[in-house]
Image: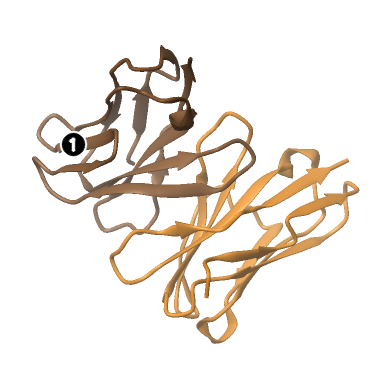
Chain colours: A brown, B orange
Amino acid sequence: ELKVEQNPLFLSMQEGKNYTIYCNYSTTSDRLYWYRQDPGKSLESLFVLLSNGAVKQEGRLMASLDTKARLSTLHITAAVHDLSATYFCAGSGAGSYQLTFGKGTKLSVIP
Amino acid sequence: DTGVSQDPRHKITKRGQNVTFRCDPISEHNRLYWYRQTLGQGPEFLTYFQNEAQLEKSRLLSDRFSAERPKGSFSTLEIQRTEQGDSAMYLCASSLEGLEAFFGQGTRLTVV
C-alpha cells in the first residue's frame, strides 16, 4: 500500500525567500502529482511528474521527481504572498487508479 | 463545459438521515473519482468509475455508502444513516484515460 509523507507540514516564510517542500513515498508510484488548495476551495492541479528525473516549472514553482529515492520536491523561488495555500503531493500505486495524498504543507508567505 | 460540477455545495443533515450528492464530470472524461477530505488532512480515496463500471472501492467505503454512475455520465454518492463521523468535504474528480484528475468544488457535509 502506497504511503505518502510530506514535510514540513507547516511553513512560514518571508516574501522573496526560497524554500523546498519534500514528498517521500513508500513504494513504486506510476506518477507523482502536486496540487494546490486555497482555504475552503477545491484542489488545483499544478504538476504531473511521470518519470525519473522529470522537472517541471511554472512561474515561481518547480517540481522534480527522483524515483530511485522515492522523492519529489516542490521548490519555491522568491516567494510572494499569492503563493500562500496548502500544497499536496499525491502518488498512484502501480496498477491502481486511486491517488494517495500526503497530509499537505500549509504555506504562509509573510510580507 | 467549465469543469467538474458538484451539487449541493453544502449540506447540513441530522444524524440518521440519508443524503445524496451529485457530481457532473468534465464531459469527455471517462474516469470519475470520489474522495473525502477532513479538516487538516489530505483527500482520501473512496471509489473510482471507468465509464459506468465501479472498478475500485476503498475500505473506507462502508456499507452505508453507495455510489453509482449510470450511463457513464454523472455520478451520485449516497450516505445512509449518517453519523457525525461522516462530516467532511466530499470531492469528485474526473480524468481522461491516464491523465491528471481535475477536482470539483466539493460538497461540505455537516452531520448534527
Query: Does the image show residue B26?
Result: yes
Q: Residues within 10 Å of mark 1 (few under 14, many from 20)?
A: many
Q: Nearer the viewer, residue A89 or A76?
A: A76
Query: How many labels, in total?
Result: 1
Quarter holding the N terminus of chain A is top left
Q: Disc 1 marks which amino acid? A: Ser
User: The residue tagged with tag 1: helix, strand or loop?
Assistant: strand
* Quarter of the rendering containing residue B79: bottom right
Residue A22: x and y in percent read 29, 24
Q: Nearer the viewer, residue A53 or B70?
A: A53
Q: Residue at x 23, y 38 (%)?
A: A27
* Quarter of the rendering containing residue B23: bottom right
Q: Which residue is mark 1?
A: A64
Residue B1: x and y in percent read 52, 75
Q: Residue at x 18, y 36 (%)?
A: A64
Residue B78: x and y in percent read 71, 63
Q: Residue at x 49, y 15 (%)?
A: A110
A44 in relation to B7, above or below? above
Q: Furthest residue to the bottom?
A: B71
Q: Nearer the viewer, residue A3 or B100?
A: B100
The subunit letter for the residue under badge 1 reads A
Residue B8: x and y in percent read 75, 61
B78 in relation to A27, above or below? below
Query: Does the image show residue A104?
Result: no
Relative side of A18 to B42, left or right: left
Relative side of B42 to B37, left or right: left
Q: Residue at x 43, y 33 (%)?
A: A87
